[in-house]
Amino acid sequence: MDGGRPRFAVLGTIEARAGDKALDLGPAMQRKVLAVLMVNAGQAVSSSQIVESVWHDAPPHNALNTLYTYIARLRKVDGLEITRHPCGYLLDVEPESVDLQRFRALLRRARDLPDDSAGDLIREALGLWRGEPFDDADTPWFLQQRAVLAGERFAARLRYLGIALGRGEHGELVPELLALADEHPLDEKVAWLLLLALYRGGRQAEALRHYEDLRVRLREELGTDPSPELRLLHRQMLVGDVPTAAPVRQAVPYQLPAPPPVFVGRTDITAALDGLKSGVVVIGGPGGVGKTALVLRWAHDNASRFPDGQLHVNLRGFDPSAPPARPDVVLHSFLSALGVLPERMPDDLDARSALFRERVAGRQMLVVLDNALNEDQLRPLLPGGNTCLVVVTSRNRLTGMAVSDQACQVTVPMLTDDEAVALLDQRLGSARLEDTEALRELVRLTAGLPLALAVVAARALAHPIFPLRALVKELHDEHSRLDALDAGEPASNVRAVTSWSYHRLSPAAARLFRLLGAHPGPDIGLAAAAALAGARPVEVRRLLDELTRAHVLDQPTPGRFASHDLLRSFARDETTPEEAREALDRVLDHYLHTGFTAERRLSPHWPPIALAPLRHDVHPLQIESYDEAVDWFTAERAALLAAADLAARGGWDVHAWQLPWVLSTYLTRSGHWDDRAASQCAALAAARRLDDHTALAEVLLLLGRGHSVLGDQARAVDELTEALASFRAIANGTGEGITQFSLGLTHARRNDPTTALDHAQQALALFRGTGDRAWETFSLTAAGWYHVLLGEIDLAADIGADALRLLDEVGDRDCEAHTHRMLGVVQQQRGDHAAAVVHHRRARELFRDLGDSYSEAATADQLGDSFRALGDDPAAREAWLRAATLFEALGLPETDTVRSKLAD
């Protein structure tokens, strides 16, 4: 070893040396932090695991900050390389530079060598010990590590003593063996070596007497007789045919089932596994996602890393044909594989678990615990120490393993589209996949679930002349999709595999799971889930936690819950029509009434509608601010659009026109104009079915405004003209005024400012008649715009000044933003670009606060023009860059115009 590189030691005091120089590792607790990293040299240790290991139940205030301070100080020690890793901190050194790791490495090399070669390695390993490991560290983790190391040292001493006896060193070893026998009076391996040393050293009578003393003590204290090996040695001593010592070699089990013949993707997970040498990893995910295939593929690829064997068991946590495997039965199987004879097998679970930990202590083994049910099933099966790697698969999240056993948790996702195609390509060959459109649809319908893809591949292979489109057709009907994903046995039937998880749920969680399948959106929040279930949020939160623990529900972002399409299909199939209808009644009411509250925060100037009454025990959220409303709409947009579509298709016609109404302002300001128009088209059909003139007028107004924004001015004029007639028919002056205002906008977009001004003036007269000051201000601002377009700049400026005076009374930010933007253009036309900058800056700030992306972009573009006219090119570029970014995000052609300004 290079004398200049640090050497680390924990087999005694915690220390590090560079050559002959002791390195200053700081105070005791800081050294203990380093000791945890030394024990795990070359692999990451999480911050929480370090804190638990060093302080246990007495951490300092703000333990993580203390830990970070210690890590920072240790990094300043010459030669200490501590790196940050996604799973924690890693001591980046050659493992054998740590005495503990070298001790274990020497023993591993000795394990497969003949005695004459192994003895020197074991003697060197034992010589690394300088005292009790880890100084006086006494937390449970250090105590456990110390006990495991003591066991490893003890086993090494026995092997070395056995080798020495084989070389004929009987007399010299008797004192050491007598001392060991006093320390371990019931250990039969020590007794066997001591009897042999006494007998071969000429002390036959003492050997026989020691055997008899041990036999009596075993009978009195343990109720058992000596082991077969000891009884055989006793008989051999009686007849004078005693063998020379030969260490009993440990059994090396190789229990891994065959790896999957076809495997794709999962490179991030296998890379994470590659970085682990010991500890516990829980591989979670829903049924059929390929957890077992992943683990077996990786285990076979890495079998050489575990020279002392691989243990495997199917714990049957989710197996309908048999109950979950009992830990005591599993341990019987493991211990048998490790060479424990039937007559030496303990009877109770705790004793078997202890013996298992003893048998694997210091051995480099892989233990695969497949299809686990829960933490209680697993804990007796965990080895002690840190030389074995345990890989668990389960449909449950097993969070308790992460908390108390520092397990690393990994969730296996669905395959990506490209991975799914690669899997089918490996199974079917590229010739069967030439129809790329059908292939992509097949991948979509199987949701990237490996089991579903495997079933589809099996069906394709069974019918080689069937085109892919035939298989796609079988899957298109969502009511029979799961029937098509059945290869003839439960383990290859997506419905059956999913049912094993479903039937493990509590009744309340199973009901919620069914109802979530009826929910129309791609995901759902807590409040909507509570409405769906007709329960309090605190109760539903617990049920959602149960569903996520069971991996039948994911939480892709905080507070949002989703599951893949095949799970949703299963859930829908389990739900009765009556149960689903009642749940959807509740959740549609929740979305409508909460959305209405949020819309009021976004656009208080817009006249409200009379909502469908709450028909169920639903408690809508109370949205208290503009920002809260935007956040809610942003999170719920997809679910709200899906709910509106469901309402239109499912006979909830009032919801079908009112949900798009509450969405309209948000969709307009956020730039989702196509969604707005599509939802309003469905709303129009619902309003006509209802033969509701108020609904028809409201929908036509919003639909016409939407088509105008999208550039279809002719259609917008037709719809707004019909809306105008409808509002007049029901004598709604405010609606009539907003429609006139909207017709003005539409004609302005048709480059007809004269007609636009006429509509704005009619709107202004109507609003002055109704006393609606907010819309009076909007109409004044619109009239100002049209005067600008007509070249009547001074008149536009006067109107803008009137609008600003009204704003002091109205206090509407949306109206204020548009007024300042109009006045900014007025000042540009007058050549007063400094004044234009003031107005445009204020307008841009307001539009940004409102989340009105298009208006902010247009204002930023005009602000850039003013800065360029003032000679402030850096400010102009900054404004244009913002405009270009927003226009590009909205997919608008204005992007190119602004980019050309940046290129000048």
Image (cartoon, helix red, strand yellow):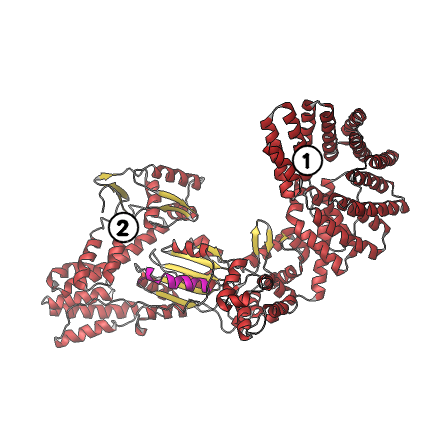
Along the line of sight, the residue nearer the viewer: 435 or 201: 435
Residue 27's image quarter?
top left
Task: From the image, tell me which residue sits under label 2.
Answer: 96
Q: Is residue 594 visible?
A: no
| Mark 1: amino acid | Ala
Q: Main secondary structure of the magenta part?
A: helix
Q: x, y (%) of residue 902?
A: 60, 33
Q: x, y (%) of residue 504?
A: 55, 65
Q: x, y (%) of residue 115?
A: 18, 63
Task: From the image, tell me which residue sits under label 1.
Answer: 858
Magenta residues span: 292-307
Label 1 crowd bin: few (<14), some (14–19), many (20+), radius 10 Å: many
Residue 79's image quarter?
top left
| SS for callout 1 | helix
| SS for callout 2 | helix
Q: Residue at x 42, y 54 (%)?
A: 271
Q: Is residue 810 visible?
A: yes
Q: Is residue 690 left or right of residue 127?
A: right
Q: Is residue 3 left or right of residue 280?
A: left
Along the line of sight, the residue nearer the viewer: 537 or 303: 303
Quadrant position of the C terminus in the picture: top right
| Mark 2: amino acid | Glu
Q: Of tags 2 and 1, which is closer to the observer?
A: 1
Q: Residue furthest bottom?
A: 239
Q: Residue furthest left?
A: 202
Along the line of sight, the residue nearer the viewer: 223 or 313: 313
Q: Residue at x 43, y 49 (%)?
A: 87
Q: x, y (%) of residue 365?
A: 34, 61
